[in-house]
Image (cartoon, helix red, strand yellow):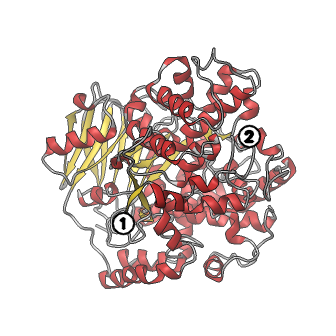
Amino acid sequence: MPNGYNGKILHVDLTKGALTVEEPNEAFYRKYMGGSAMGMFYILRDMPKGADPVGPDNVLTLMTGVTTGAAISGQSRINANAKSPISGGIGDSQGGGFFPAEMKFAGIDGLVIKGKSAKPMYLWIKDGEFELRDAAHLMGRKTGEVEDILKEELGDKKIEVLQHGPAAEKGVLFSSLVSMANRNNGRTGMGLVMASKNLKAVVVRGKKKPMLADSKALAALNKTGPKILPDNPDMPGLAAEGTATVVLFQNTIGSLPTRNYSEGQFESCEDISGARMVETVLKERDTCHACVVRCKRVVEIKEGAYKVDPKYGGAEYETLGTFGSYCGVNNLAAINLANQMCNEYAVDTIAAGATIAFAMECFENGVITKEQTNGLELKFGDADTMLKALEMMLNGEGDFGKTLGMGSERAAKKWGNGAEEYLITVKGAEAPAHMPHAKHSLGLIYAVNPFGADHQSSEHDPYYEEGVADLNLNRLKLLGLGTPQPGYSLTEEKVRFAYLTEVFYSMLDSVELCQFVFGPAWTLYGPAETVEMINAVTGWGVTVDELMAVGERRLNLFRVFNAREGLTRKDDKLPKKFYKTLKGGGPTAGIALTHDEIESALDSYYKFAGWTNDGIPTPQTLEKLDLAWAI
Ligand code: SF4
């Protein structure tokens, strides 16, 4: 068994109720390392082309990585992959908390789940033993209730639960997988896939610590974390205010999507800032297994119209962006209640908030009327109406609630009447709260990313622009990036930056590391420490290049999957609204992306990636990556 791993992948066939263990060899582990690179091996091998995303043929993988469970910050992560019910291409989402480490301790490295159970079940894994158990009593319940019932039933408060919620049972397309009732594998509908298999939850508990090649080296690196944290320009803010710390910066550079991406600055940004959260509603900070950063929020509101239960955590930046400025809402309590509702029902807050903002713009422009909204008067800035729309969405209430639950792209098709002019989606995925008008290379990544617009798939432009801090640039130099570019640009060098940092992030989603702790530029640890850490765990002697090859494998396997399902360059397409000039104030007012810059960036990007001009990996590229089997 290789260091760092259990050497066991558990295959779950829900149709047959069969559980079987595979023990891959060390070369397999070193080639894919874990997470979505490893998941893609099984998905491409076991899922037939054209599988129904909510049918038994879809294959859902849940994979930890090489370092999961080791005593160092940022390692307790897990990636979920399957065919996405939103795009019909690959789905991908990373989540953290304590579940991933506990799954490792329970004796397995990953799960490959296929088929469909005749009745609702949950999978119980404890100390290397596993069984499927009846889950009928858990259905229809909020995630926090399910956690409580399972802890009582299994007589152990330290179990960890990864579950889909009631929204998936109502068919909400962007349903997530939730652990601890507040940590999400949020994007691309992985909760709906698990629900479609009649698998309610995976529950884990164990005592098995992974073997380490050099525990002293790992402990030494771990000890540096708290020491270097205060000197990193970005870390103290993240620790003190959580991801909400970027609200004001985003506003300053004109990248805070306001009223459905019509403006890049929100006049009430201070009301939804990280500092305001700390002053008003924050109860405490929380963390993931062994992490010193403690960026997670716990919000409690006992008085007023919007009460919030700390069990469901607190709003992250993306939730503040989508339910806040995206909807024109400045009520922090209401946004945190929206966050709670999304966690109770298990949905992606980005898709949920952005879909409501899209409906608001449609309503304000007369595309839809009270007839379509079941009487709701949807207006930007109206917190009560936003929460009512969310409630209808989560419960599949009325035609409007059901339509919202399909996401904005399908809603636009249903409503017609010019609704598609207001879409902010790529491959069906609503764009996060980072605007390509301020971060042009991120716009390129929104277009090419195999699972749609995503902000966690590459480094953002300000870290490769003139004036970037030495710490950031010195790290990027390890990836061959030493020439910062002008702001608000999409030069050829920026495309190279987008591609190379995308590959690094892709590796992080395979090795399974938190992108706030390990990364190519701003995080607690940089590429050099990433290599050091993996070698301390495995003893393999890996280099940055070997890790980058893992990232490339993941990206290429995603694109192979998408090509097999018919997705090509035509799907690497940004919404029309990105090409219209922004209103409002700030540095992005009057700015629009141009078709010329994006098409030319696509040409360059495909060349860097070794793909055809239609965005498909060439046989030579796959052979170079030792992926000839995927041609
Ligand atoms: S930085 Fe935040 S999200 Fe990442 S592992 Fe630490 S506590 Fe979890």
Question: In the image, what residue type sits under mark 1?
Answer: Glu
Within the image, what quadrant is residue 306 found in? top left
Residue that carries the numbered disc 1 in the rendered image: 26
Q: Callout 2: 10 Å neighbours few (<14), some, many (20+)?
A: some
Q: Residue furthest top?
A: 371
Q: Would you name the residue on which mark 2 appears?
A: 575
Image coordinates of residue 483 in percent, x first then y, are 76, 77
Taking the image as shown, residue 246 lies to the left or right of residue 466, namely left
The residue most toward the left is 155
Q: Nearer the viewer, residue 154 or 590?
A: 590
Residue type of the residue flagged with mark 2: Pro
Q: Locate the N terminus by quadrant.
A: bottom left
Q: Is residue 595 left or right of residue 478?
A: right
Q: Residue at x 32, y 72 (%)?
A: 71
Q: Against 191, is 370 above or below?
A: above
Residue found 42% across the figure and 59% down from its top: 296
Residue closest to the eye, 34 or 395: 395
* Residue 340 point in image, percent of width and height: 42, 42
